[in-house]
Amino acid sequence: MIKRVLIGLLCGAAVLTAGILIGHYGIEKSSGSAPAWAKDVSQDVDERLLEEILSEVDNVHIQENLRELTKVPHMATTAGDEETVQLMLERWQDPESGLDQAWREEHMVYLSFPDPDRPNKVTVVNSSNTVLHMVREKEKAYTPDQMDPAVVQPYAAYSPAGKVQGKLVYANYGTVGDYLLLSQTVALKGTIAITRYGGAGRADKAINAAPHGILGVLVYTDPLDINDSFMSDTNETYPHSWYMPPSGVERGSFTSTYGDLLTPYLAAKEETYRIPVKDITGVPPIPIQPIGFEDAYVLICELGGKQSLQEWQGGFNCTYNFGGPGFRPSSAFHSSDVKLDIFNYGKVKNSSNVMGVIRGGVEPDRYVIYGNHRDSWVHGAIDPSSGTSVMLELTRVLGMMVKQGKWRPRRSIIFGSWGAEEFGLIGSTEYTEQYFTKLSERTVAYINVDIAVQGNVSLQASGMPSLQNVIFKAAKQVKAPGVDSMSVYDKWLQYSNRTSPVYGPIPRMGYLTGAGSDYAPFVHYLGITSLDISYTFDRSKTKARIYPAYHTAYDTFDYSSKFIDPGFYTHQAITKTAGSVLVRLADSLVLPINCSDYAESLEDYLRWAMMLYENNLLAMNISMEPIKRAVSSFRSAATRLEQVIRSSDLANETPLKVRKINDQLMLLDRAFLNPPAFPSQYRHVIWAPIETSMQTFPGLSDTYLRAMSSGKATAWAKVHQLVSVMSQAIEGAANMLFDVI
């Protein structure tokens, strides 16, 4: 019995010893090699590989992309537009340099067109209806581009059809204040107003006119505002320089909202509910038509009545009078009317987005979206095809790296070639409406490169302040075109700068406070951190508000290659800069989104709000203290999160900790959304569209000035409500940055 017990104990001891030894060496061996997924989840930006990617960007490829894209006019839903759809699909499905997947997505959208069989007409007619002057219907041809039969007649998209006539008056920019001042001098009922572009939105020029009984509106681009007052096509304007020729006309969408007008907040699919056309808002209630400055000169210089204000004077070598109403007694047009015959019509048409994707290797369910619209008003060499030619080159390089097995991004990259942007950001808006939940939950950032190159002097970027650091880093990495010793960053700093309390002198970034391009639905509707990048001209040397061929028949390959970017080296630089931003957002272990930079902008906005408004607000029993506390809380939370990031060895942390921090950064701007705060699709409390020029919170600025103007208690109540909305939104964003409850 004792012998059996001893044998049992010895056997047990042997088994135990063997187990310990096996366990020891087994554990030691497994601890010596990380799990197969560990290396993948710690993937970060590979600077060497990024340099290789950028070195592949070719200016000649971009040039040929632009030549191909601008062969024919490609207005949305036309045959030319379909050609560009097929081009995008062909490139993105290329077996050697294409993306993982590419496809088209279609929406049935409401567009507005002129009637090719009944062209819009603007005439000066006398009492017997004899035509004394007829406005040019088509722009003058200098190259075969302008003679293409697909060039659309200049028109105002979404202007109603109608025949109206009346005495002419001059209404400057057509703002609410302009019409009010004019009405104090001239009887406006039954008149036709002529206004210049700028100062107010396109549609607003007619919307603001209608309450005064004005029957129709003309709009033109004044040489003072676009051409530095140059007017002669003999030796001053295109084809001799970049300036708009006399017959040039800026086309455009005359709406004050964005997205398909019949399906607000719904993707415009075939069976989607549509509101009645009569219920559309934000479009001109009266006919409006754009004309060239050669015809505007004839009309304005013949006007009678009192001389208008000095700030209303433009670039013509005559006095800009208000109008009698009508023309001066000594004019050949005396007692004559201006007549508008507008035959525009609306139609639901099929418009395509072209989509492409490179799937992420680690976090495929996190998206960095890069987009630009594809459609143009005519040939659109700069708007939008400079951006499309850049996107095609960037996708060629990235696609080639993926196909060769050299690279795959950490996160998925989605490319969007949006349709029907020129009619009101339609393609991108329908995309955000169709995929609202998925994009809200999974999108890291949106990069917009529309007018990629409208000059060759400096980078220009607008976006959330949290992306300031990543665009700076990218700009430092790229050589400035034509300047051997300077980077894109150096040139930008030299051209446009500000002094940061943290960093000292840095390049000046703008904010995305409006709806000028496809970033709008991502910023204002979804609250996605966004960036808009372009290269621009030296604004200290010209008064041009944008490149002068904008939306005209002269925005061609010839124009771009001669006067904007000969050699396409600026296109190459913007491709590299945008590509560096894209790869850094897609590959960084920790998202390069800096909350402290956001805090600095909020503090700057608060400082201006206190200087401008605090005393008057206190007089109305409205305290700024809630916003002060909220901004202070945001700063504390941002500082805390930055400290956590800096002090952590995140490459060796559990992937869940990295994911948690990245989700806090990704969702930061979502916390600023408040749908009831502002009308229409503008839901972002901080970057709501701005109507004033104050350097503070746009929504608060506009609401405050309206209250000051009206003095009504209801208007001041709206200010008080907005202070509460803003303070709670900022506080909510701060809470997003703290660890956990």
Image (cartoon, rainbow, N blue to C red):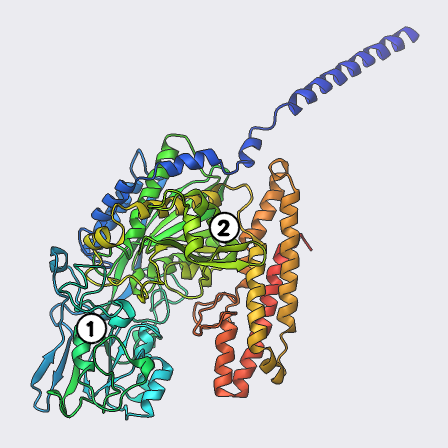
Circle 1 — which element? helix
The quadrant holding residue 595 is: bottom right
The quadrant holding residue 220 is: bottom left
| Position of residue 203 measured from the top left corner of the image (x, y, whole percent) | 32, 74
In the image, taking residue 310 as reference, residue 155 lies left or right, namely left
Q: Amino acid at mark 1?
A: Phe
- State yes or no: discs 2 and 1 in contact (Cβ < 8 Å): no
Residue that carries the numbered disc 2 in the rendered image = 442
The quadrant holding residue 108 is: bottom left
What is the C-alpha distance between the residues marked 2 and 1?
Answer: 48 Å
- Residue at horizontal 48%, vertical 81%? 706
| Position of residue 230 measured from the top left corner of the image (x, y, whole percent) | 22, 68
Along the line of sight, which residue is nearer the eye, 507 or 267? 507
Farthest residue toward the top? 3
The quadrant of the rendering that contains the C terminus is: bottom right
Farthest residue toward the front? 485
Check the image and report above or below for 731 versus 579: below
Check the image and report above or below for 583 versus 336: above
Q: Which mark is residue 496?
A: none
The quadrant of the rendering that contains the N terminus is: top right
Q: Amino acid at mark 2?
A: Arg
Q: Mark 2 or mark 1, which has the lower sequence index? A: 1
Check the image and report above or below for 470 versus 219: above
Along the line of sight, which residue is nearer the eye, 550 or 728? 550
Query: Can I make out residue 157 in this image?
Result: no
Q: Nearer the viewer, mark 2 or mark 1?
A: 1
Residue that carries the numbered disc 1 in the rendered image = 293
| Position of residue 400 measured from the top left corner of the image (x, y, whole percent) | 35, 35
- Residue at horizontal 25%, vertical 67%? 227
Total numbered labels: 2
Neighbours of disc 1 within 10 Å: few (<14), some (14-19), many (20+): many
Check the image and report above or below for 364 versus 632: above
